[in-house]
Image (tube, coloured by chain):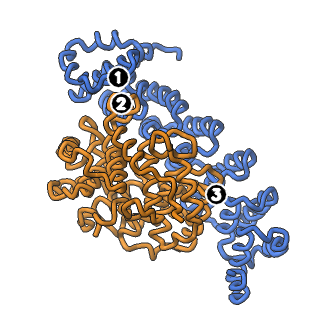
Chain colours: A blue, B orange
């Protein structure tokens, strides 16, 4: 990072400097370092001092520069500390400086990549995002995270939140890219449905779109008929109107023999019969 | 033949007591901010093992109350800000000890009601994060306190329904991917408000049943690994839908038993991994739902022993 930072990252590990910064409140510290809180291993004692300092400032509701420095050290020690993220939000709201928000985002990036399943960090991003109004950065960041772990629930739902909040369009290629990497990726199938069909995205539920998406799902199923997610997607796109998708319906029927042990194929056929009103035939399948 | 063997209940009890008292461990230090949920998992597990009386009830209750704020909400520990999930854990712990009458329920109720938004959803705390988990936490807490009347139940239900996906599952917010944990929260919320009739229970039941893998374990989403915590979330959802027989219970029992640490006690997320209190609770809760005779019966929606609810 190039410019000098208000939030001095070097102080993260410099416990002595942080203690010196908080000389005036140090007398309270003993209360926080009680025997039963002593860490088992010597080098972790620093973590306790940082944690104690943070709690002192938190209790005093001190929304200051040094509070940012101390809580930064505390958050690197324990990124799951809920109250620490809360405290930083209080400080940011109180100081209201744009540069601080941007720096906070960079800190968030680093911690998020190290702790990709941490709820607090993702929510913190959302908070920053509403101030910074930076959808492109968020889309880029979620993509980086997903390239590391293509099924990270937080990353996908954050991306969905960004897309919805900022009315981002043209996300069709994104889900396709991830489905090319893994055609069983349930998150990518869900995202595809969300970006193409959900109420927020389009008022036009055109037959043309449904037919092309049904063909796409069918094409993916060719790679494996055991692909749960692709079947769910197909069912929803068809939405019980199998008569509008005659060629796929016929293909399902042809599959029955070859895939006789595949529940997903039989359930599909059962639903086709049911929607045709061929109830007695459908009942045979139930056995 | 008893299919619930081996299940060394004494060893698990020892594990849980040790974890409670292991205040010098690194893990203990790192989980300080959510201690109250840890307490709920530990205490409920001990109760399922018929061992709640081995805990220091008065000390624990006193500590729980010290986590309460002016607003009525509870934080994760004494120096933590209040939030909905911690409030639920606090109320559940008090219910376990049958000491709910010591709670100023009006304050708690008004705290919970204050977190409901105009679209019926609930925030987790004043910072505004919305997630269907919080709807479940609010509804469950108010159900325990028998005060569902203080919120807009109809709107809360509408929000839950809006989280329903094309595959029959539920996500954390409308449109988000179906996930077993979220399905549990949504089904729980619908169950407690008598609103299950609003969904296609066959479709949801089917999605849940498909979570069972060849090794008998249950996963959270299609094409993911099994994890013991889903033994609770998927199973209790199926129980609430009256479809517990839609999964192979013998295979699931086998899977959960394989996740035990037969030397040190406790249950892990997966066979041969390290056990933790979280997975110990969910493993035991799953076994309880499956009828394990050595454990108390647990309620699928309240996630508390049945005898407490009746």
Q: Nearer the viewer, residue A246 or A115?
A: A115
Q: Nearer the viewer, residue A108 or A93?
A: A108
Q: Nearer the viewer, residue B75 or A109?
A: B75
Q: Residues within 10 Å of mark 2 (few under 14, many from 20)?
A: some
Secondary structure of the residue carrying tag 1 is: loop
Residue receiving disc 1: A39
Label 2 and label 3 in one chain: yes
Residue receiving disc 3: B213
Q: Position of residue A24 (x, y in %)?
A: 20, 14
- Reply above or below: B87 against A202: above
Q: Position of residue B53 (x, y in %)?
A: 25, 51
Do tag 2 and tag 1 residues touch (Cβ < 8 Å)?
A: yes
Residue receiving disc 2: B29
Q: Position of residue B68 (x, y in %)?
A: 21, 45
Query: If you read the primary sequence from the N terminus, does the residue marked by circle 2 or circle 3 appear first?
Result: 2
Task: Report in which chain the residue with disc 3 lies.
Answer: B
Distance from disc 3 to disc 1, alpha carbons, whole Å, reads: 41 Å
Left/right of residue B100 with respect to residue A180 in the rendered view:
left
- Reply above or below: B158 against B12: below
- Reply above or below: A120 against A8: below
- Reply above or below: B241 against A152: below
Q: Position of residue B1 (x, y in %)?
A: 54, 65
Asked which quadrant contains residue A238, the reply is: bottom right
Q: Residues within 10 Å of mark 1 (few under 14, many from 20)?
A: many
Distance from disc 2 to disc 3, alpha carbons, whole Å, reads: 36 Å
Secondary structure of the residue carrying tag 2 is: helix
Distance from disc 2 to disc 1, alpha carbons, whole Å, reads: 8 Å
Residue under the image location 43 percent in, 46 percent down: B278
């Amino acid at each position: 990072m190039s410019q000098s930072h208000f939030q001095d990252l070097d102080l993260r590990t410099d416990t002595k400097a942080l203690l010196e910064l908080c000389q005036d409140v140090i007398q309270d510290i003993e209360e926080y370092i009680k025997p039963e809180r002593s860490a088992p291993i010597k080098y972790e004692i620093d973590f306790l001092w940082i944690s104690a300092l943070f709690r002192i400032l938190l209790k005093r509701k001190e929304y200051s520069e040094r509070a940012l420095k101390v809580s930064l050290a505390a958050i690197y020690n324990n990124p799951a500390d809920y109250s620490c993220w809360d405290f930083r939000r209080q400080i940011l709201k109180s100081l209201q400086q744009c540069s601080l928000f941007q720096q906070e985002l960079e800190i968030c990036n680093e911690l998020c990549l190290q702790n990709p399943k941490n709820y607090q960090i993702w929510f913190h991003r959302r908070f920053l995002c509403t101030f910074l109004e930076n959808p492109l950065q968020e889309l880029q960041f979620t993509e980086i995270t997903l390239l590391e772990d293509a099924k990270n629930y937080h990353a996908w739902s954050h991306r969905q939140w960004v897309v919805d909040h900022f009315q981002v369009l043209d996300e069709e290629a994104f889900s396709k890219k991830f489905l090319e990497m893994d055609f069983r990726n349930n998150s990518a199938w869900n995202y595809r449905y969300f970006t193409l069909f959900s109420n927020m995205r389009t008022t036009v539920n055109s037959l043309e779109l449904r037919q092309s998406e049904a063909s796409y799902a069918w094409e993916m199923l060719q790679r494996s008929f055991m692909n749960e997610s692709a079947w769910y997607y197909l069912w929803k796109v068809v939405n019980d109107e199998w008569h509008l998708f005659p060629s796929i319906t016929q293909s399902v029927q042809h599959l029955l023999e070859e895939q006789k042990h595949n529940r997903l194929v039989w359930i599909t056929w059962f639903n086709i019969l049911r929607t045709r009103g061929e109830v007695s035939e459908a009942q045979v399948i139930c056995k | 033949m008893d299919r619930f063997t081996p299940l060394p209940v004494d060893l698990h009890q020892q594990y849980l007591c040790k974890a409670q008292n292991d205040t010098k461990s690194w893990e203990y230090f790192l989980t300080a901010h959510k201690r109250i949920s840890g307490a709920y998992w530990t205490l409920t597990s001990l109760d399922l093992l018929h061992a709640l009386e081995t805990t220091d009830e008065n000390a624990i209750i006193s500590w729980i109350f010290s986590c309460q704020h002016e607003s009525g909400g509870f934080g994760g520990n004494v120096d933590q800000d209040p939030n909905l999930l911690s409030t639920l854990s606090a109320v559940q712990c008090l219910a376990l000890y049958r000491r709910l009458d010591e709670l100023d329920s009006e304050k708690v109720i008004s705290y919970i009601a204050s977190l409901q938004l105009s679209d019926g959803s609930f925030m987790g705390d004043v910072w505004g994060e919305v997630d269907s988990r919080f709807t479940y936490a609010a509804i469950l807490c108010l159900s325990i306190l028998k005060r569902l009347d203080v919120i807009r139940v109809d709107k809360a239900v509408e929000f839950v329904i809006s989280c329903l996906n094309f595959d029959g599952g539920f996500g954390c917010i409308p449109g988000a991917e179906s996930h077993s944990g979220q399905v549990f929260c949504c089904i729980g919320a619908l169950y407690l408000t008598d609103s299950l009739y609003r969904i296609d229970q066959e479709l949801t039941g089917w999605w849940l049943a498909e979570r069972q893998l060849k090794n008998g374990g249950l996963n959270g989403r299609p094409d993911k690994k099994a994890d013991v915590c889903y033994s609770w979330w998927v199973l209790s959802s199926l129980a609430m839908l009256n479809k517990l027989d839609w999964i192979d219970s013998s295979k699931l029992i086998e899977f959960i038993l394989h996740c035990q640490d037969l030397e040190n006690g406790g249950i892990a997320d997966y066979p041969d991994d390290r056990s933790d209190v979280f997975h110990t609770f969910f493993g035991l809760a799953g076994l309880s739902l499956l009828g394990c005779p050595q454990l108390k019966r647990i309620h699928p929606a309240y996630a508390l022993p049945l005898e407490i609810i009746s």
